[in-house]
Amino acid sequence: MKQFRLIPLLAFSLLLVNCSEDQEDDDLGSSIENPTTYSFVRDGASSVNFSGQTTRILMAEEIISAMMVETTTADALDAMFAHSEGADNFSNPALNASDKNVRGKTAASFDFFSGNATDQALIRADFDTWIGIQVNEVFPNWNAAASPGAAGQIADGSATRYVDGRGLEMNQLFNKSLIGALMVDQILNNYVSTDFIDAGSQRIDNDNGVMEGDKNYTAMEHDWDEAYGYAFGTAEDLADPRPTIGLDDSFLNKYIGRVEGDPDFAGITDEIFQAFKLGRAAIVAGDYEVRDQQAELLRRLISEIIGIRAVYYLQQAKLVLEQPTPDFGAAFHDLSEGYGFIYSLQFTRKPGSQDPYFTKAEADSLITDLLDDGPNGLWDVSPATLDSLSDQIADRFDFTVAEAGS
Amino acid sequence: MKQFLYLIVVVLGFTVAGCSGDSSDDEMRPEIPDGGGNGGGGGAVEFDRGAMLAHWADFIIIPSYVGFLDDFADVNAAFDTFRGQPDATSLENLRAAWLESYKRWQWISMYEIGPAEQEGLRLNVNTYPTDTDLLEQNAASGSYDLDLPSNRDAKGFPALDFLLNGLGDTEEAILMAYTDGTSGPRYFDYFEDVLTDIETRVQRVADAWVREYRDIFVANDGASSTASVDRFVNDYIFYYEKFLRAGKMGIPLGVFTGTPAPNTLEAYYLPGIGNDLFLQGLQAVQDFFNGKAIDGSGTGESLASYLRALNTVKGGEALDEVINSQLNMARDMVRSLQAFKTEIEENNPPTDMLLAYDEVQRVVPLMKVDMVSAMSIAIDFVDADGD
């Protein structure tokens, strides 16, 4: 596992504060020391820790890999998903030893699910279902050709995709939906949420410099770091994920990178990074107004990542399906990814509100529309449906279908 | 592996057209009417896209498929002889027939449009490197479905390369694999199934061209992103860039990764052949550019004659001549190389082959920017984001 790099930047930080005061002292107040990288130090040691997030991301990586090995059993996948400490579920011994798991944090944010055990259970059941379909329908047809209504393999350019009878790739549904249900939900609706990070005596403790147990951080500092870890916890340089954004994992990091690669949204990585960093610096300074401003900014930016990718895949698939000789495998692959991003919309968060951009019912309805043009799901979907879905999604965000679609 | 998604980049088309004033005279820009293909308006250039399409179909594409299938009969015959009496002579004859056919394949590989696109012909017939583990597993079990996408890298010409040249380190060892009482019948059966798979697919494509697609292709003679010329020119440039340039040279050279990968060479198990196959592909591209009939009867309307009709110049020279000169330069450079495998394995970096690659690459912008700009064709492929 990667260790956080200890970078004593105190002197440098002070220098920077002087600069930033000149430029934006109204915004920052006078006491926030905003470092250049996500490096925070107390008594000469780092006060940053998000190893639990890194662990869960690595567990999720092993799950989605195992979903593509056709000899894996449902029991094995279920056990990886709901790992318990010491169980031999993963190839990485550190993961086996961990007391963390993925399923327990799936649809588990304080804001959205602490009072909604029903939706939480339904969402977890969806993930269980996708594992079940993969093992019980797709694996037995691993060496069969897919056709409408029949699971099997289908070519996507030089790649081979494995789909169920509706043309859906279960590994993609699991992977992309988890970006919403784990990473986005935990960041936006839990670890940067005022109701969560100010709970109990956390604000007073933070003001008074009360450490969490024998750790070198306050509970609030740690909460914010955990949010950061779900986005950047696998970065090559954990203090500055920007140089390798998109290359570090298969989840939120990857798709921040993909959106960054679209000239319409270039710079979004830095915006997200700066918001995390300034929010953490504000916590150190006890400036909760600036902290909460960063939380709202993160809600807008990270929700946009989900919305943009949902529209992107719908539009890419539309272009494929409009070809004289459609490459169904390519369209199915796009739409399986798109399905996961649409599913993830229910975990987004409208800034300044308690609401997602799309409720669970609305996200479910979009997915129903994606699959109900005919009896066989994606085999029957029309370009018009893909446009309609794209419009409905883009309408709720500040980007256009054209900006997201390429 | 990356997939390539098709994007209609209308904006790019406009942009390219907008900056083309340097290389071609805007006054001479053709007004190509929808459907007609023959500019009739005052001052417009007369060029008959329909005539070009008909020449392509009747004198180049369909005869190429027919020629391939004629040749392929020789492979089948040589295989039957080898199976009847597996010895050094019959193996050598089968190898020669295979190589001849592999060269002919380079003359049809670029036509991945219509029936071939539907068939996924190129990836079904020539995906390399071949997956020798999968091939061995298939042959040993005798239970496999060559129609499955996952078997594309265990069949086609690259699988035959392994079966003919890679089953052992020596001629004796290769022959032994076929004369052995256990493995022999399995390899023979697998060989035969691979031959049948290739022939069936190419036959299906050729039949579809003759039966219906020829007329559809020629009739769709307009100028729009879905017209035959626009679509084919995209496929043609895509082939040049991804399969000829990158597949046969760039990827083995490690141009895109920084790490040379000689194991990804075409015809890896018979070193030296990769050069020939590349040169065949290059000649096919150039002859197509110039509209050369396959039967040697001369030339017809072509991309070159189209450029001449448009009076397209670059740096004071006719663009079709610039493209031909660059193709000739690339050919000369590649011809002067040793076997690709030798170049890559014995030179670090493989400078001579990289220099040749650069000349091959220089054709790309001439076609992908200058030529399509003159013809008002939008490039509709980009590298997608992978995964």
Image (cartoon, rainbow, N blue to C red):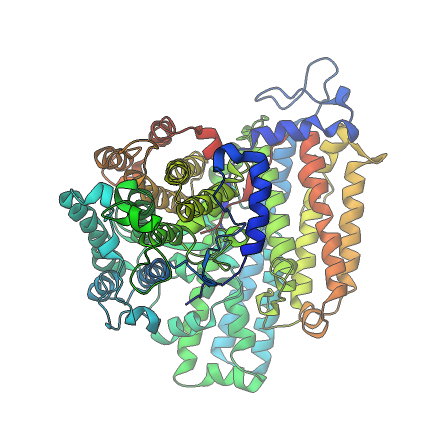
Residue beneath the point at 49% across and 85% down: B176
Determine whether B17 is above or below A208 in the image.
above
In percent of width and height, residue B92 lies at 60, 76
Q: Is residue A122 above or below residue B254?
A: above
Residue B341 in the image, given as x and y percentages of width and height: 66, 70
* Up/down of A86 relative to B23, above or below: below
Q: What count of labels does the image hold?
A: 0
Q: Quadrant of residue B280?
A: bottom right
A171 w.r.t. A119: above or below: below
Q: Is residue A178 left or right of residue A112?
A: right
Does residue A167 appear in the picture of this structure?
A: no
In the rendered image, residue A156, in percent from the top left (x then y), is placed at: 42, 50
Residue placed most toward the observer, B181 or A56: A56
The answer to which image quadrant residue B62 occupies is top right
Q: Position of residue B89 (x, y in %)?
A: 60, 80
Residue at image position (33%, 73%) is A93
Pick the front one: A59 or A114:
A114
In the current view of this chain or complex, which residue is farthest to the left? A118
Q: Is residue B164 left or right of residue B319?
A: left
